Amino acid sequence: MFDNLPEFVSTILAGLGETVAATLGGIAIAAVLSFVFGLAMLSSSRTVRVIARIYVEIWRGTSEVVQLFWIYFVLPILVGYQIVPLVAGILVLGLNFGAYGAEIVRGAIQSVPRAQYEGAIALSLTPVQRMRRVILPQALVEMVPPFNNLFIQLLKGSALLTIIAVPEMTNQARNVLMDVFTSQAGVIWTVLLLFYLVLAILITLGMKVLERWAGRIVGRGPSQAARDRGLRVAADAQLGIGGGGPVP
């Protein structure tokens, strides 16, 4: 049953580079868009908030598969040249998960206690200084755990690229191995599951390092940040506090 295991591993490994490239590229784009549109949704300008909300709702509210088809098949007609499949996949992953990430950024910033804004204003800090020196460092601690989940979801979403013939790991398992070793499907897909599991663990370890770094910036460890977050949620629930408007 396991006689062909080395061949299965080597074949799936051949697609590892594409999977990692799609994941890291998607994470980079998603991270940038998350902060850009997350902050935009808290802007004092109604126009900016509306534009940010339109982006979030379109990319969060439509099918990721249809988005992939649109970018790969429709966009080349509009721009006049064909897009490389991997690039199309990275764009879709970044744009799609950036919409979810924008809500994470917005929520984390709004979770910072009001007293922090008032203290920054009392120190005569400009809006940019308040955000960069006071609000964002504290909000970053709250963002890391949900971003960890988001990036793992993005990793798993990279398997969708097989439908536009990107030779990533799932494509290798389905199109290369299953054509020859149909009777060993269980072993093939189990090996693939383990590859994704290892990559997800690596993402989690990286985010744990980031969480500890973010906690040190504001003088809190990850456990203290989690306790503070739980206390704020409980207090808000008891007082009936929710929502929020633009950041001062």
Image (cartoon, rainbow, N blue to C red):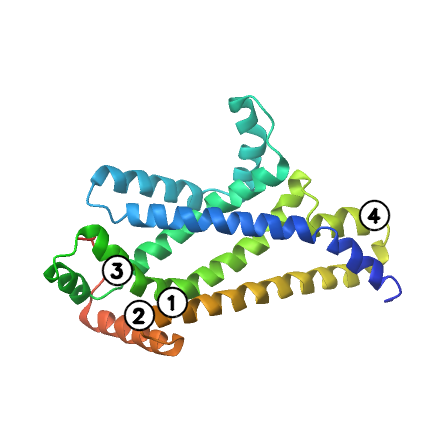
Coordinates of residue 40 in the picture (x, y in percent):
29, 45
Nearest-to-viewer mark from 3 and 4 = 3
Kind of residue at disc 1: Ala
Kind of residue at disc 4: Asp
- Give the distance between the C-alpha atoms of the residues marked 2 and 4, in whole angstroms: 54 Å
Which circle marks residue 133 in the picture? 3
Q: Is residue 200 above or below residue 160?
A: below
Residue occupying the point 33% across, 78% down: 227
Left or right for 92, reference 12: left
Q: Which residue is mark 4?
A: 179
Q: Contact, CB < 8 Å: mark 2 with mark 1?
A: yes
Mark 1 closeness class: few <14, some 14–19, many ≥20 residues within 10 Å: many
- Give the distance between the C-alpha atoms of the residues marked 3 and 4, in whole angstroms: 56 Å
Residue occupying the point 43% across, 46% down: 60
Residue occupying the point 57% across, 35% down: 69
Q: Is residue 182 above or below residue 220?
A: above
Q: Is residue 227 above or below residue 10?
A: below
Nearest-to-viewer mark from 2 and 4 = 2
Seen from the viewer's position, the closer of residues 61 and 166 is: 166
Kind of residue at disc 2: Val
Q: Residue furthest top?
A: 80
Left or right for 195, reference 92: right
Q: Contact, CB < 8 Å: mark 4 with mark 1?
A: no
Q: Which residue is mark 1?
A: 214
- Give the distance between the C-alpha atoms of the residues marked 2 and 3, in whole angstroms: 10 Å
Circle 1: element type: helix
**Residue 180, can we see it?**
yes
- Give the distance between the C-alpha atoms of the residues marked 1 and 3, in whole angstroms: 13 Å
Coordinates of residue 94 in the picture (x, y in percent):
49, 46
Q: Which residue is mark 2?
A: 218
